[in-house]
Amino acid sequence: MNNSFLKISPEVQKALENNQPIVALESTIISHGMPYPKNVETALAVEQIIRYNGAIPATIAIINGKCCVGLSADEIETFGKEKDVWKVSLRDMPYVVSKKLFGATTVAATMRIAAMAGIKIFVTGGIGGVHRGAAATMDISADLTEMSQTSVAVVSAGIKSILDIGLTLEYLETLGIPVVTYQQEIFPSFYSNQSNFKTPLQLDSAKEIAEMLNTKWSLGLEGSVLIANPIPTQFEMPATQVEQHIQEALAAAKTNNIKGKEVTPFILQYIAKHTGGESLEANIALIKHNAKLGAEIAKELVA
Ligand code: PSU
Ligand code: MN
């Protein structure tokens, strides 16, 4: 890796040198996942929670072609406000970097940059996956293939039911990616802590999760582990209500001929708009909840 493309903030650099716990955070969720100003408020609050729980946050984004690890509050504000930020997954990285553009990194691109910097834990809301209807469209997020290659664990609230949860779990199995749910037997589905699927694996403490991560990587098994942290019950949305909004969002995406990388942001925005902000509040609550668990795992990992 040519380090001239990487720009690590002094705080994160120091934490790396001192073997302190660090938690990576993505920027697509800021620029394409939530509306302004809630996106910026949430990104800053999530960083605070990570600090409060004893780890150093490292929000990742591409600024003027540099892969930045650790953003200032002003930089987060810019990403939250700017309308034309690229959504950067792996295939977009060389273009955005060589053109010296601004890019908000998806789970896949964030993982890759975190790995370049030497960070092992990454917290987000939900990952991309196998879309409903993928048997015909082949719309499968590069987040999954990246998780098969890059040794950064991802803490999420499970898989959003805009995706095909069953097919995503199958694909994760094919790619050799362990899926661990925290403290329950049912795999969670983002807005709900339930789904129709049993979790492949369950662990009940941050310590056990860290032990499993260390074991995986010591065995020479490269790649991620998906850690699913169920949304707390008080913030859940009724499954039938969510399903109705998803159906409408998918129909609207079809009518508007939304394709490729626009699909996920379109559906997320549609649902946020049509649930009168309720889904947004659930989204914010679950990310904060994930930040706490991510910090705890990061601490155990360096202990
Ligand atoms: N799912 C969510 N919220 C998000 C995303 C997914 O619930 O913000 C974002 C993440 O950045 C994820 C990306 O990596 O969308 C996946 O996009 P695609 O499906 O185009 O790979
Ligand atoms: Mn896609």
Image: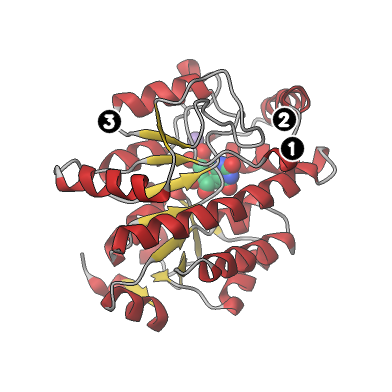
Q: Within 10 Å of the Cα at label 2, are there few (<14), some (14-19), or many (20+) other Cα atoms?
A: many
The answer to whether residue 87 is seen in the rendering is no
Amino acid at the residue labelled 1:
Ile
Task: Give 250 or 282, whichever is nearer the viewer.
Answer: 282
Expressed as whole percent of the image width and height from the top left, the position of residue 19 reads: 28, 72
Residue bearing mark 3 = 176
Q: Residue reaching furthest right? A: 276
Q: Is mark 2 on a helix, strand or loop?
A: helix
Q: Within 10 Å of the Cα at label 3, are there few (<14), some (14-19), or many (20+) other Cα atoms?
A: some
Q: Is residue 286 left or right of residue 183?
A: right
Sequence-wise first label, 1 or 2: 2
Q: Quadrant of ligand 1?
A: top right
Asked if labels 2 and 1 touch by Cβ distance under 8 angstroms, the answer is yes
Residue bearing mark 2 = 249
Choose top left, top right, bottom left or bottom right for residue 28. bottom right
**The C terminus sits in image quarter:** bottom left
Q: Is mark 3 within 8 Å of ligand 1?
A: no
- Separation of marks 3 and 2 at Cα, in angstroms: 31 Å
Expressed as whole percent of the image width and height from the top left, the position of residue 271 reads: 74, 37
Choose top left, top right, bottom left or bottom right for residue 97. bottom left
Q: Is mark 1 on a helix, strand or loop?
A: helix
Q: Is residue 153 left or right of residue 51?
A: left
Image: 199 above or below 60 = above
Residue at point 28%, 47% (across, down): 211
The number of callouts visible is 3
- How has the structure been colored for display? secondary structure
Sequence-wise first label, 3 or 2: 3
